[in-house]
Amino acid sequence: MNDRSGIAKIPKHVPMNQFEVADNCLQIAGQPLVDIAMQLGDTPFYAYDRTLMRTQVEHLRATLPAEIHLHYAMKANPMPEVVQYLAGITDGLDVASAGELEVALKAGASPANISFAGPGKSDTDLQAAVDSGVIINMESNGEMLRIAALAERNSVRPRVAIRVNPDFELKSAGMKMGSGAKPFGVDAECVPAMLESLKELPLEFMGFHIFSGSQNLREQAIIEAQTKTFELAFRLAQFAPSPVRWLNIGGGLGVPYFPGERRLDLAAIGANLFPLIETAREKLPEAEIVMELGRYLTAEAGIYVCEVVDRKVSRGEVFLITNGGLHHHLAASGNFGQVIRKNYPLCLGNRISADEMEMVNVVGPLCTPLDVLGNRVNLPRAGPGDLIVVFQSGAYGFTASPKDFLSHPHPSEVLL
Ligand SMILES: *Cc1c(COP(=O)(O)O)cnc(C)c1O
């Protein structure tokens, strides 16, 4: 890895190691960060390294049973080029709106391999789903009746699955999306009755979608949830009007963001899935098994880059004020699902190491104290023109940010 001239070992104070460093500058897809900034002509920007996305897909393929089809949940990063790239190396896409569906179809994904989930699908969403022939994950009985009405009007037989709100929870998930009272899916105990009414409707039953949570970094919790997911699917299949042909077991694989977090050990998760797949082959012989992943495929491949505009000292603390912040990267500011604010991993991209390091606060240009990217981080001494890099930014970055807040320019995005 270090045989190219100038490529250095990543120094300890840089919190992430998936990108290389050469001549004291961060490299993305083999290009120096400063060159990328020059070519784009402006900061801030998001840059995504496709090779790192491919590495994640290959790691999953090498570790999980081959029967598992990998879907990309595109809400994590719907940039059309990213979706197109991932559509080409995964087995399908999961969309959550008519807008995402349009991007998915343009990316060349086959409707047979697209599923559409999300509570509160509008009639426009449902019409687009019916027209394109994707699998619709039904989130309620009412939604089922609306799809059936559309089907009758259009003389078609849409392919549907029931999204199940499981009767167990994914322990220690960053974001719980199953068990208890939830807006997502149909409570497991109500599914048999819904299957009974489905028999009478012009709908083609495909199977189940069981998603219990997101951003989990504990292998044991994921293993337990996946085991219970299969058990629940086997139980519910007994009430189905026809054999289960499709089972989406969710995802939930997390990525490390904060100090002390480490990457998941996929081997343990894979080892648990092999026997589960064996049982599924007996109990649900016609079922295609799908796992849907968002951030696991894109988060680590992306960085957000902004530029220092001003450096000031206030009562003994140094503030690096940048042209980017909360409006471009809500998650890194700590305002997207964090309870206690923690820093995303940061570095000074154009000068990785320096003799003089200092403790600084990295903030954005917005007139709100919430606009913080780094609270007391140790960086090489920096000033105007230097490039701040936020790692782990390839998922829920650009797409999940209030980009019009304060009417600053939007960041650009580039896939490298
Ligand atoms: C958001 C979402 C995902 C993706 O979650 P990640 O944490 O990005 O992997 C997958 N499935 C469903 C149903 C979702 O809502």
Image (cartoon, rainbow, N blue to C red):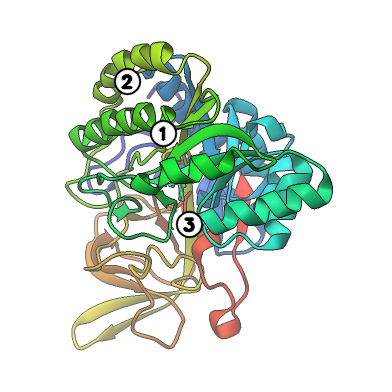
Q: Earlier in the sequence, mark 1 or mark 2?
A: 1
Residue 174 in the image, given as x and y percentages of width and height? 28, 53
Give the residue type that dot 2 points to: Leu
Q: Is mark 3 within 8 Å of ligand 1?
A: no
Q: Residue at x 74, y 34 (%)?
A: 108
Please provide percent x and percent y for residue 208.
48, 36
Closer to the camera, 129 or 239?
A: 239
Residue 295 visible (yes or no): no
Could you tell me which quadrant the C terminus lies in? top right
| Secondary structure category for the residue under label 1 | loop
Q: Which residue is mark 2?
A: 273
Query: Percent position (x, y) of residue 262?
Result: 23, 39
Q: Which residue type carries mark 3?
A: Tyr
Q: Is residue 171 left or right of residue 107?
A: left
**Which residue is painted at 30% across and 13% down in the image?**
275
Q: Amino acid at mark 1?
A: Ile
Report the front residue among 373 and 90: 90
The one of 97 and 58 positioned closer to us in this rendering? 97
Q: With 31 as the anchor, is 273 left or right in this view?
A: left
Residue 249: assigned label: 1
When the figure is inspected, residue 244 is found, relative to residue 101, above or below; the finding is above
